[in-house]
Image: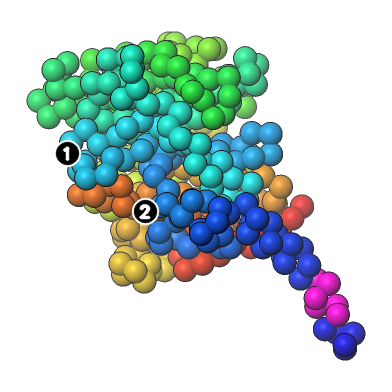
């Protein structure tokens, strides 16, 4: 064998090993994922399309946990269509094993706030090292019987905790963002550099983005909420990340379940003031022919920093399907930086080799 062929095989050994490992982690009859395929069906290790929407990804002890709202087959977004929060676990971010419902609204004895909720949406989980507790937050629209004409006029923030990443999570009650009867809508939970936890949410009904500090146990807001100056009114689906001393906010406009243009802001500190940057999206999703003015058909939900890679960020979006939410999809794309300005370029397929190892 030629020396160059031997060298090329040697160079490819880590890739071959990782492909073999992912084959081993897949269950019989299913197909291991070897790349991210934005907008395409994403089978779990049993071959079933992932059902965890409005999601986030949390790393814990070297493994990745995906939490999202479980949509019920046959229900539209105008009905009670969420069974709770589903969790998946992965070792490579591509192949996910179902861990079941970590919060089940139909469980026997479920709290009426959950059992009767109209919508349980956009779950976000953080781990609090000091108390060794996983904190789960979600947008909780109360049933029509508890207020609102449409059931979406005001929203609570539900909180549940667990000592394990895979739950079960115990419901701890809800709070009203902004201490206001209307509450808040889409939100992010952001730990600040001093360890404090912040609830950043869309104030109802006028849709300013506001920030409130949570109590040390993370269960309720303490003190007043403040408007994040510089963030355009009507900014939804907020997802924050920190890079080189700056705080970035990826978000959407407001248009219900329909896609719109992504928004990007930057600040020197979490409290702002924020400066708007250009739309980060580039290119077109060939499946739906949607480009930057519609965020490839998606809406932001989370930005994830890839552990073990240098300057590696993944922008994560839902593709909403209000008529058939169980079929809703996901878009994961790498964030590149052009002179510190985030750019999210459409890619049909990609993998983590795009990010250099430190
Ligand atoms: C926009 C939000 O970002 C979504 O999570 C969802 O609540 C829809 N509005 C509902 O119209």
- In the displayed structure, does residue 232 sit left or right of residue 124? left
Q: Which residue is mark 2?
A: 329
6 over 193 or under it: above or below: below
Q: CB at mark 2 closer than 8 A to ligand 1?
A: no
Q: Residue furthest front?
A: 28
Quarter containing the N terminus: bottom right
* Residue 202 in view in this figure: no
The magenta stretch is 6-11
Q: Which residue is mark 1?
A: 78
12 over 96 or under it: above or below: below
- In the displayed structure, does residue 252 sit left or right of residue 2? left
* Residue 308 in view in this figure: yes
Task: Give coordinates of residue 353: x percent, y percent.
Answer: 66, 62
10 Å neighbourhood of mark 1: few (<14), some, or many (≥20)? few
Q: Residue at x 24, y 49 (%)?
A: 324
Q: Residue at x 27, y 21 (%)?
A: 115
10 Å neighbourhood of mark 2: few (<14), some, or many (≥20)? many
Dominant secondary structure (helix, strand or loop) of the stretch shown in magenta: helix
Q: Residue at x 61, y 37 (%)?
A: 59
């Amino acid at each position: 064998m030629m020396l160059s062929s031997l060298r090329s095989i040697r160079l490819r050994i880590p890739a071959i090993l990782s492909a073999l490992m992912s084959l081993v982690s897949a269950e019989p009859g299913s197909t291991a994922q070897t790349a991210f395929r934005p907008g395409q069906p994403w089978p779990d290790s049993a071959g079933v399309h992932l059902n965890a929407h409005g999601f986030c990804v949390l790393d814990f002890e070297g493994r990745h946990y995906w939490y999202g709202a479980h949509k019920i087959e046959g229900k539209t977004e105008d009905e009670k269509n969420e069974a709770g929060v589903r969790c998946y676990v992965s070792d490579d971010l591509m192949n996910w094993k179902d861990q079941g419902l970590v919060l089940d609204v139909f469980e026997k004895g479920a709290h009426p706030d959950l059992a009767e909720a109209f919508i349980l949406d956009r779950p976000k989980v953080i781990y609090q090292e000091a108390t060794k507790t996983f904190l789960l937050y979600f947008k909780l629209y109360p049933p029509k019987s508890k207020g609102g004409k449409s059931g979406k006029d005001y929203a609570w923030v539900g909180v549940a905790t667990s000592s394990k990443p895979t739950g079960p999570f115990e419901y701890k009650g809800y709070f009203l963002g902004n201490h206001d009867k209307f509450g808040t809508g889409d939100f992010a939970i952001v730990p600040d550099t001093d360890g404090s936890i912040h609830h950043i949410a869309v104030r109802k009904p006028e849709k300013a983005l506001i920030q409130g500090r949570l109590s040390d146990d993370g269960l309720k807001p303490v003190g007043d909420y403040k408007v994040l100056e510089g963030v355009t009114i009507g900014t939804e689906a907020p997802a924050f990340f920190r890079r080189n001393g700056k705080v970035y906010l990826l978000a959407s406009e407001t248009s219900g379940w329909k896609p719109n243009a992504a928004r990007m802001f930057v600040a020197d500190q979490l409290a702002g003031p924020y400066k708007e940057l250009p739309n980060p999206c580039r290119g077109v999703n060939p499946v739906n022919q949607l480009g930057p003015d519609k965020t490839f058909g998606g809406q932001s939900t989370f930005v994830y920093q890839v552990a073990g890679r240098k300057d590696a960020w993944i922008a994560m979006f839902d593709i909403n399907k209000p008529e058939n939410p169980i079929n809703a999809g996901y878009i994961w794309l790498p964030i590149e930086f052009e002179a510190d300005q985030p750019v999210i370029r459409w890619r049909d397929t990609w993998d983590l080799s795009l990010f250099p190892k430190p």
